[in-house]
Image: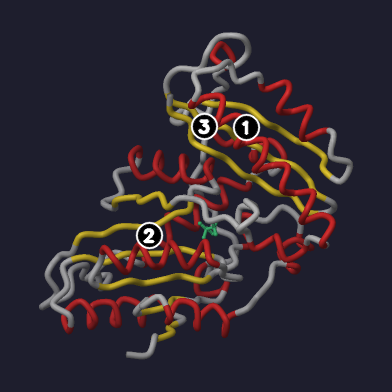
Amino acid sequence: MAIKLVTTATELRAESARLLTEKQGSSQGLVPTMGALHEGHAQLARTAVENNDVVVATIFVNPLQFGEAADLDRYPRTLDADLALLEAEGVDLVFAPSVEEVYPGGEPMVRVTAGPLANKWEGASRPGHFDGALTVVAKLLHYGFPGVGLPGVGLPGVAPAAYRAYFGQKDAQQLTLVKRMVADLNFPVEIVAVPIVRSAEGLALSSRNRFLSDDEREAALVLSRALKLIEGRANAHEPLDLESARAMVESQPLVQLDYFDVVDTRTLEPLAENCRDTPFRGEGLALIAAKVGPVRLIDNVPLSS
Ligand code: PAF
C-alpha cells in the first residue's frame, strides 16, 4: 500500500483511526522528524514498523526550536525523498503540517518549560531550544494519540491502542528531556530510544553532515574516535582520563571543541569523580559537541562497566 500524506490534524486523526480499524491494530508508533531524513531516521522508522500495527511519521521544521532565522531558512527541505524513504520502511502515514496548522495563532503563549536540565550542554549554546523542541513534541504526541477524534475524544469503533514514540539516542539531551516531560506530565506514551547509526568510518549520521566539506568530514571523525577511546577505557575498568581524550580532539585544526564530558544518564550532571584517576565503574554517558568548520556536531556513547 502506498504511503499516505496528510497535512491537517483532522485528516491525521481520521486516517490513523481508519488504519487502526482496517488492520484491527492494537498499537500505534509515532516517529517525529524535521525531515531531511537519512539512515538514522530510517532506523527509527524500521524499529517503529517492527513493533507497531500502524506507524505515523511526522515531518515538521519547528520554528520554535531555532535560534536564528538563518538556521531555520537553511534547514534542508527534501519532502519527496523523505516520503520515499519512509514508504520503503513501511510507514503507513505521514503528517507534514504547515506552520499555520501547528501554530494557528502565531507563536504559542503557553509553552513547555524544559527546566534546569536544558541549561547545560546543548542548551548552554542554544537558549530556548529545548523549550521549543519540547513544546512541539508535546503537540506532536497529542496529534498522534491513536484513535482520538477531538473534541469527543475516543472515535467510535476504534479500540484503544498501545502508543509508542521513537527518538534517536544521538540527541541524548533531547531524549532525556522528552522522557522527563512524559514522566513528569503523565503523557500516556512509551518513549523508545533508538541507537545512533554511524557511517562506515564512525561518523554519527546527521542532517547537518551534508554541509561538511571532504576535509571537514575527515576531521569530524576525531569525535567518534575520542568517544571510542573513552568507551574502551570504561570497558577495561581503567580511569577515563578525559583530559588526554580532549587533547586528541583539540589537536585537530578544523575542530573547535565545545564540550566533552562523562555524565549521569538521568541527570546529565558530570561524573567528575569517576573520570580522572580512578577506574571507571557503573553507568554513564560520554557527550561531545564541536564545531567542525561551520557545522556544529554532537555525538555520544553510553558507558557501562
Ligand atoms: O529531533 C528532531 O528532529 C526534532 O527536535 C523533533 C523531535 C522532531 C522536534 O521538532
Disc 1: which residue: 229
- 118 and 287: which is toward the camera: 287
Disc 2 marks a residue whose amino acid type is Leu
The amino acid type found where label 1 is placed reads Leu
Quick one: SS at disc 3?
strand
Residue 179 shown left or right of residue 246 in the figure: left
Q: Marks 3 and 2: in contact by CB < 8 Å?
A: no
Quadrant housing residue 225: top right
- Nearer the observer, disc 1 or disc 3? 1
Residue 29 placement (x, y as % from top left): 31, 64
Q: Which mark is residue 141?
A: 2
Compare marks 2 and 3 and give the one earlier in the sequence.
2
Query: Whole-Å distance between the Cαs marked 2 and 3?
Result: 26 Å
Pointer 3: what residue? 285
- Which residue is pictured at 65% across the width and 45% down the height? 298
Which of the two discs, 2 and 1, labels the residue nearer the N terminus?
Answer: 2
